[in-house]
Amino acid sequence: MEPKKNPKADVGRNSALYFVIGLAAVLALVYGAMEWKKYDKVNNYDISMNVEDQLDEEVPMTEQIKTPPPPPPPAAPEVIEVVEDEEEVEETVIESTETSQEEEVIEIEEVEVEEVEEDITVPFAVIEDVPVFPGCEGASDKKACFQEMMQQHIRKNFRYPEIAQEMGVQGRVSVIFVIQKDGSIGDIRMRGPDKNLEAEAMRIIQKLPKMTPGKQRGRPVKVPFSIPITFKLQ
């Protein structure tokens, strides 16, 4: 089949040559633009320094203030009078406290010293004889019986405050009280999330019965005890 188009009329036959020539021309222009440098016109400036003008400095005039001389010392008195001490001073005589062999020595009878009972506090965990809760007199482990009876007492007397229920208040009240030397309950302290819960815990602890006091080395002592009371809404 013969081509219908004239090969001389083909526009794209020298396109590769034209592309290379154009790329070379563009690179030459870019290189010439990057290497182009421009300098400012040279001006003739007088860079000499006039030293004499700088050294000509005026010194300010200062005025000296004269300080006045110190005042003369006071004159000494011409005549010194001596005043005689007419009053007689009695001398203090210190008597000797040493005894002589002639003095009789008095025998002193034996003085009875009264024993003062100390207010000792011993923690519940380390006391020798723990306080005895009523009903635990015959128990072999009085500590365990004491704690069990405390839990029974709290469950028996527990009453959730109505105002706390309405407000939706709940939490744990930490209670610390002291079993006194006579077995009574005192020094009750507590801390909780609400005053109404603290008041209910106080009421429960105040209803504790009188106990047999704890003993350390055979003497009654104060025994602190702490227990938490939990208030939880169902």
Image (tube, grey):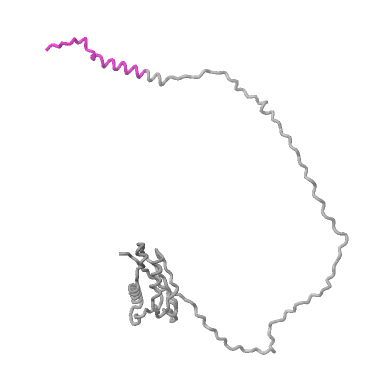
Residue 217 x, y percent position in the rendering: 43, 80
- Asked which quadrant contains residue 23, the reply is top left
Residue at image location 42% in from the left, 76% down from the top: 185
Q: In the rendered structure, which segment of residues is drawn in magenta?
A: 1-28
Identify the image quadrant of residue 202: bottom left
Q: Could you tell me residue 106's position as x and y percent?
A: 64, 89
Quadrant housing the N terminus: top left
| Quarter of the image that includes the C terminus | bottom left
Q: Nearer the viewer, residue 75 or 223?
A: 223
Q: Relative to 22, is 106 above or below?
A: below
Q: Residue at x 57, y 86 (%)?
A: 111
Residue 14 among magenta residues: yes
Tell me if residue 204 is in the magenta stretch: no
Q: Main secondary structure of the magenta part?
A: helix
Residue at 88% x, 59% y: name it: 78
Q: Is residue 92 left or right of residue 11?
A: right
How many marks are shown on the rendered structure? 0
| Residue 11 screen position, x and y as percent | 23, 13
**Pick the front one: 162 or 91:** 162
- Quadrant of residue 128 in the image? bottom left
Q: Residue furthest left?
A: 1
